[in-house]
Image (cartoon, grey):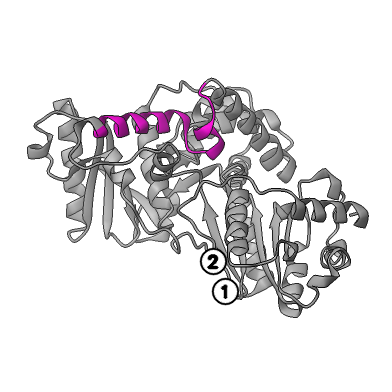
Amino acid sequence: MNSDNLKYVLRQFVERSLPFIRPRELILPTGTGKVIGLAGVRRSGKTFLFFDTIHRLMEQGVDRRRIVYLNFEDDRLHPILATELDLVLRCLRELYPEMLNQRVFIFLDEVQNVSGWERWVRRIQDTEDVEVFVTGSSSQLLTRDMATALRGRSITLEVFPLSFREVLNFRGIEVISHSAENESVVSGALESYLAWGGFPEIVIADETLRPLILEEYASLMFYRDVVERYGVRNERLMRELLRHVFRNTASLLNVSKLHRDFKSLGFNISKNTLFEYLGYLEDAFLVFLVPKQEQSVRKQAHNPKKLHVIDTGLVAAFKANSARDVGHKLETAVYLEMRRIRRDLCYYTNGSEVDLCDADGTMFINTCWSLAEIETRHRESKAMLLGHDRWPNAHGHLLFHEFTCSVGKELPEAEPAWRFLSQKRDTRWSNFLH
């Protein structure tokens, strides 16, 4: 890392205007005495949460010259060695000696590009008057490296693409109770949300540009966050696996069957390779593998996992039919909503299937696109009975998009999905990974 280039980057940040920030529900804590880490998929808004925090610090009177923002994907900083990170504070003091002996706020974006970053952060956290914030797009990188190297000195939060509530806020749509016209608007907004997802740039982009942006995201995530990061040799296999998971969100994933399917397509691979590649996708925040709720860990391990993808808009980017299986995309949207709140989520099946429950059995949720058909209502009624039989004290929810007037009498726990997803939930501290 060249010190002259670094000084140019530092001064440029101090002198430039910050971009316009739309508020998110997650607000980063300051003054905690901890390193604050943000982990999440690329383009989910981690950088803008940084900028929002910087705005708040400036409103509190913090001089801009005491704030450092570095994006470690900036080519002007490459190559970056951990041994050179001391240049950051040294160059800042040379540029602004009048700020000497005052607290410095350091924001480091995409830290996984610097091997050994966590040791430097730990040292300056212990020896300098600093507050440090970091982001990364690898779950294991932040949770493992921060937990082991910083040893209680860090807090890590997950960042997801926008929730449905946040999309409504971005679009200026207010939920008005007992208004049929408003309900129609919000219901239509949910259909758009399922089609295009919640990446902030997508939500505010012109609809004609959204497919192109999503394809760019898919390509970037595939190459940068999977192939390059993990040194994947069989790119064709990884691409097919990625396409498979995005075409089958909210479905059970049987690795043995998937292995046979890939063998029939001519891939000479082992099941261990599939498990390994799925692990890469999880680590990059592209997929979530949800276990079946079982008392026995052994039984849980032997059952298929339920697959959910990070964003329903990316489904179309991986060449799936974007209008197909809207019910599955709705189920994934509900999963992501609850995943923002807690991590101990499962599914359960025993004749019927409960789409989502927690490990303690305090709540369960079933999701269905349409309750217009009597066969569907019968199926969902059986699933709700299964949930109540297994967890007598649990709160059950049946979420739907389309319905008939008789639904309320037949299924009293049924609720429009848009209403459930638009309800305010306190996620400020529930995003903690540890």
Up-down relation of residue 169 to residue 395 (above or below): above
Q: Pinpoint residue 408: horizontal percent, then vertical percent.
A: 11, 38
Q: Pinpoint residue 108: horizontal percent, then vertical percent.
A: 71, 57
Q: Pinpoint residue 351: horizontal percent, then vertical percent.
A: 24, 41
The answer to the question of whether label 1 and label 2 lie on touching residues, with beta carbons closer than 8 A, is yes
Q: Which amino acid does label 1 sit on?
A: Thr
Q: Which amino acid does label 2 sit on?
A: Pro
Q: Does the magenta stretch include residue 324?
A: no
Q: Give the range drawn in magenta.
A: 182-207
Q: Is mark 1 on a helix, strand or loop?
A: loop
Q: Residues within 10 Å of mark 1 (few under 14, many from 20)?
A: few
- Indicate the quadrant containing the N terminus: top left, top right, bottom left or bottom right: bottom right
Query: In this image, 76 relative to 278: left or right?
Result: right
Q: Is the magenta stretch mostly helix, strand or loop?
A: helix
Distance in Å between CA atoms under marks 1 and 2: 7 Å
Which of the pair 85/94 is nearer the observer? 94
Q: What element carries label 2?
A: loop
Please tell me in which quadrant of the rendered image residue 176 appears: top left
Query: In this image, 403 relative to 424: left or right?
Result: left
Label 1: which residue? 32
Residue under the image location 79 percent in, 50 percent down = 12
Label 2: which residue? 29
Q: Pinpoint residue 369: horizontal percent, then vertical percent.
A: 28, 31
